[in-house]
Image (spheres, coloured by chain):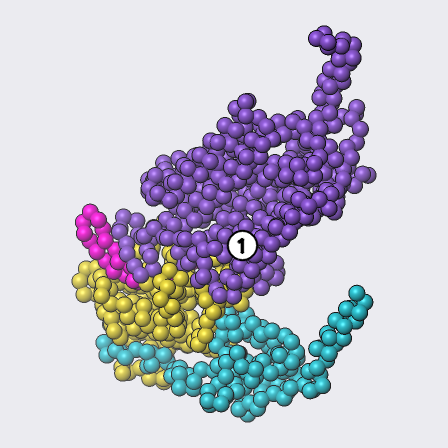
Chain colours: A yellow, B purple, C cyan
């Protein structure tokens, strides 16, 4: 452990972590550890002054590695029924290949947590919504299962629970007939813990994911995004995702 | 019309065996549809052909077809009330009833396919006004209310003369309604096969075409089964209307694809739907354009083929072609993968970059047919309980010219006995 | 016809009256020290409390855990013969005991797990700064991107 003590002020903690991204070579940056945040007090609301985001360095993402996918399935307790077309996937690894040059990349794609989420626009009941801090969620209490959000999502990020469920994780209640997707591990984020995929990427993968508040200048993600070129998937649609990629 | 007496309207004779048989059969199909819906909801949607890739399936094909046709079925009433073509007025009540019934059938299918149909009340109590879907919920419920008021005005002797007001309102409402239904697809920016402003006018043309076809079928069935006289004045006009609407639909359908094909990023999806994979292109050229457009146009426009029988057959083909068209729009549009990374070939465990497969399951189709049955059941029971249909639609009853013409011929016959005698 | 109606009515009355002879059900004993409110108040308002908290947590991100469904399960869960908490398919589940009696269906467990989470996992939730729990590799020197 570093000098991170409870007695330290929040500022100190963040400073420590903000420094964990260091440039190795042009276009390649090392993210030694995920940027944590402070747990929000239990009785406080999510604030619009925060914009949670992820930065994925595709230069570091290993084609063979699926640590983030496995971690997500474990964390959210997503079962597999052996029916790939209807089994839920909150995060998936996509392999890119440019036909002309042979350039390849491997990267995870999950809910992009858009600033202007098309899913929330089309949802008839308001079950798809964006939280004040930018996390896009499905309120499965009022989801009627019409799947219009799945039609509208440009990222194919959502799944539909095609069968009755048992043994759900307490932090990821999910049931037959509702739409679901990556929550950016909102239950962990609210408790001040980074998403499961990010943790796994650092523990088992090559540390290609960086999590943090894109509006907090002290967070590593904000500093890296300010200095190095990053891109968003389908930026032309102006959904302004909170997930950013480096290296594509 | 002053020289024509008021037409006599009467309930359909519900004691005829053919009527009873029809009601029983429709009831059974409806119950089977309900059973299919229960099976799908109880097991979960994995028992259907729908998946995370093709999220809307056969129920949506049937539901959209019925909802679109509902708006078009009101057309006959609109022509009478709004455009003052009095020859259509006797059929206006049936037109409104059919519109209500088709909408009820379509919505029933749509609702029974929801992941949580038990939460219908949530859809009625939580509105996200940014959603075109929520707007449609209001448009559909409003349509019910407005058409009911319109029906009341038409069927109440004291209000009959004032029915053009509600009629005009219903006409405008249904145009907006079909625009809304088309926009469900037209507003999906990320789906290359959909996102287009042509969707709204295309859906309006589709509604006129499918609605008129179903109206013709229901009218012919009712008059044949109840052995009521039916002349050719009304059916001749409907024949021309149908031809115009079918041609307009085909034109806009082609326009939809041509517009998309002009766009560099969308050539591939047009190629896929129209020329690529055997399945969708077969349905487009064979069923939608061939069976649903070319043959009906031939049957309606070639003078030698004019009869109630060919008109019924042409209408039936329009319905088949229409279902194929909605199938290509809904399923074909989803089968084409989303482009997340333009310029790259992609591959993943979640079917990125591959054409999505879909094979409709039996329960889905049964649910859709159940919606059809529900709509027709409502029409059957409605016409048997209330006076929706004129006792006779013989030419002399509805057309002053026909009456005059007939009278003249009669006079001539009386004045000059046949010379051959 | 009238006979049939009378018979039907009688059957309905017998059917609906039967449980009332048995009196209101006894709630299984809970493990906690004290509930959020008196039993009478809980009986009447637990659904309002849950609903309010549900929306506050879901939409605003307020995570006060004391009055949530998870807290209910932690104290009230009933164990079956195998010593494990029973699911909602068992009529011994504390929600069902009352809800069956009142003939009100519970929709919560279509999505929520009807069993409490084993304590072990809860203990793993960090009480302090999360970085201690989740960031094992904090040995890099604090240093801004160059």
B353 lies left or right of B256: left
**Residue toward you, B41 or B269:** B41
| Residue C22 image-quadrant placement | bottom right
At 32% across and 68% down in the image, what residue appears? Answer: A69
Q: Is residue A137 above or below residue B8?
A: below
B414 lies left or right of B115: right
B384 lies left or right of B249: right
- Where is mark 1, residue-wise? B367
At 42% across and 67% down in the image, what residue appears? Answer: A183
At 37% across and 64% down in the image, what residue appears? Answer: A83
Which segment is the magenta one? A93-117
Most extreme residue toward the front is: B421
Q: How many marks?
A: 1
**Quadrant into which the C terminus of chain B falls:** top right
Residue B28 at least partly seen: yes
**Residue toward you, B376 or B193:** B376
**Residue toward you, B137 or C35:** B137
Q: Is residue C2 above or below residue C33?
A: above
Give yes or no for residue A108 being in the magenta stretch. yes
Q: Secondary structure at mark 1?
A: helix
At 79% across and 71% down in the image, what residue appears? Answer: C6
Which percent across, then down, holds residue B285? Answer: 41, 36
Which percent across, then down, holds residue A202? Answer: 27, 72
Q: Is residue A47 above or below residue A102?
A: below
Most extreme residue toward the top is: B419
């Amino acid at each position: 452990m570093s000098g991170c003590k409870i007695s330290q002020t929040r500022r100190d903690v963040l400073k420590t972590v903000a420094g964990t991204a260091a440039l190795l070579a042009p276009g390649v940056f090392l993210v030694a550890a995920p940027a944590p945040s402070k747990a929000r007090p239990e009785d406080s609301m999510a604030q619009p002054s925060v914009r949670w985001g992820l930065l994925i360095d595709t230069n570091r993402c290993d084609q063979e590695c699926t640590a983030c996918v496995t971690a997500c399935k474990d964390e959210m307790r997503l079962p597999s029924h052996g029916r790939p077309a209807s089994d839920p996937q909150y995060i998936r690894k996509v392999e890119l290949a440019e036909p002309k040059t042979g350039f390849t990349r491997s990267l995870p794609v999950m809910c992009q947590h858009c600033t202007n989420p098309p899913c929330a626009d089309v949802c008839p009941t308001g079950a798809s919504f964006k939280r004040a801090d930018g996390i896009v969620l499905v309120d499965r209490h009022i989801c009627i299962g019409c799947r219009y959000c799945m039609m509208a999502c440009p990222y194919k990020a959502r799944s539909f629970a095609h069968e009755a469920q048992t043994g759900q994780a307490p932090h990821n209640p999910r049931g037959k007939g509702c739409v679901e997707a990556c929550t950016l591990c909102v239950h962990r984020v609210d408790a001040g813990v980074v998403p499961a995929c990010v943790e796994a990427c650092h523990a088992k993968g090559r540390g290609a994911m960086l999590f943090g508040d894109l509006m907090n200048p002290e967070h590593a993600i904000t500093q890296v995004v300010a200095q190095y070129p990053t891109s968003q998937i389908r930026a032309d649609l102006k959904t302004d995702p909170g997930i950013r990629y480096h290296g594509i | 019309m002053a020289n024509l007496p008021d037409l006599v309207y009467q309930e359909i004779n519900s004691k005829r065996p053919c009527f009873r048989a029809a009601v029983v059969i429709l009831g059974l199909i409806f119950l089977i549809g309900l059973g299919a819906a229960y099976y799908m909801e109880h097991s979960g949607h994995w028992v259907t052909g729908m998946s995370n890739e093709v999220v809307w399936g056969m129920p949506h094909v049937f539901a959209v077809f019925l909802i679109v046709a509902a708006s078009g079925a009101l057309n006959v009433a609109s022509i009478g009330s709004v455009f003052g073509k009095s020859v259509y007025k006797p059929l206006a009540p049936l037109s409104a009833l059919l519109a209500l019934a088709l909408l009820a059938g379509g919505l029933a299918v749509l609702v029974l396919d929801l992941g949580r149909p038990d939460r219908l009340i949530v859809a009625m109590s939580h509105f996200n006004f940014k959603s075109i879907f929520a707007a449609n919920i209001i448009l559909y419920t409003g349509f019910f209310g407005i058409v009911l008021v319109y029906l009341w005005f038409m069927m109440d002797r004291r209000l009959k003369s004032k029915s053009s007001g509600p009629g005009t309102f219903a006409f405008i409402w249904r145009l907006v309604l079909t625009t809304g239904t088309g926009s469900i697809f037209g507003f999906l920016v990320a789906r290359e096969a959909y996102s287009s402003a042509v969707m709204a006018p295309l859906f309006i043309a589709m509604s006129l075409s499918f609605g008129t076809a179903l109206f013709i079928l229901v009218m012919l069935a009712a008059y044949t089964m109840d052995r009521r006289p039916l002349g050719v004045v009304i059916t001749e006009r409907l024949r021309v209307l149908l031809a115009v609407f079918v041609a307009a639909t085909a034109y806009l359908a082609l326009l939809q694809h041509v517009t998309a094909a002009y766009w560099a990023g969308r050539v591939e999806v047009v190629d896929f739907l129209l020329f690529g994979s055997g399945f969708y292109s077969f349905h487009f050229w064979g069923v939608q354009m061939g069976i649903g457009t070319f043959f009906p146009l031939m049957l309606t426009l070639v003078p030698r083929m004019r009869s109630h029988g060919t008109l019924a057959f042409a209408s039936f083909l329009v319905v088949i072609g229409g279902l194929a068209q909605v199938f290509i729009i809904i399923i074909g549009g989803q089968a084409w993968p989303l482009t997340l990374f333009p310029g790259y070939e992609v591959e993943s465990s979640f079917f990125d970059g591959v054409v999505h497969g879909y094979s409709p399951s039996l329960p889905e189709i049964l649910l859709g047919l159940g919606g059809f049955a529900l709509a027709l059941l409502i029409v059957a029971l409605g016409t048997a309980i209330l006076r929706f249909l004129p006792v006779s639609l013989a030419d002399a009853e509805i057309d002053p010219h026909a009456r005059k013409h007939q009278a003249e011929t009669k006079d001539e016959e009386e004045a000059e006995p046949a010379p051959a005698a | 016809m009238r006979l049939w109606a009378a018979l039907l009515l009688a059957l309905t009355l017998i059917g609906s009256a039967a449980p009332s002879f048995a009196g209101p059900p006894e709630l299984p004993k809970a493990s906690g020290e004290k509930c959020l409110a008196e039993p009478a108040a809980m009986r009447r308002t637990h659904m309002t409390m849950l609903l309010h908290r549900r929306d506050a947590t879901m939409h605003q991100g307020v995570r006060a855990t004391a009055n949530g469904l998870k807290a209910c399960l932690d104290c009230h869960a009933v164990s079956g013969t195998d010593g494990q908490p029973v699911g909602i398919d068992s009529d011994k589940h504390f929600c069902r005991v009352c809800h069956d009696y009142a003939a009100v269906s519970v929709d919560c467990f279509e999505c929520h797990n009807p069993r409490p989470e084993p304590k072990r996992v809860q203990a793993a939730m960090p009480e302090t700064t999360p970085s201690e729990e989740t960031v094992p590799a904090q040995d890099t020197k604090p240093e801004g991107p160059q």
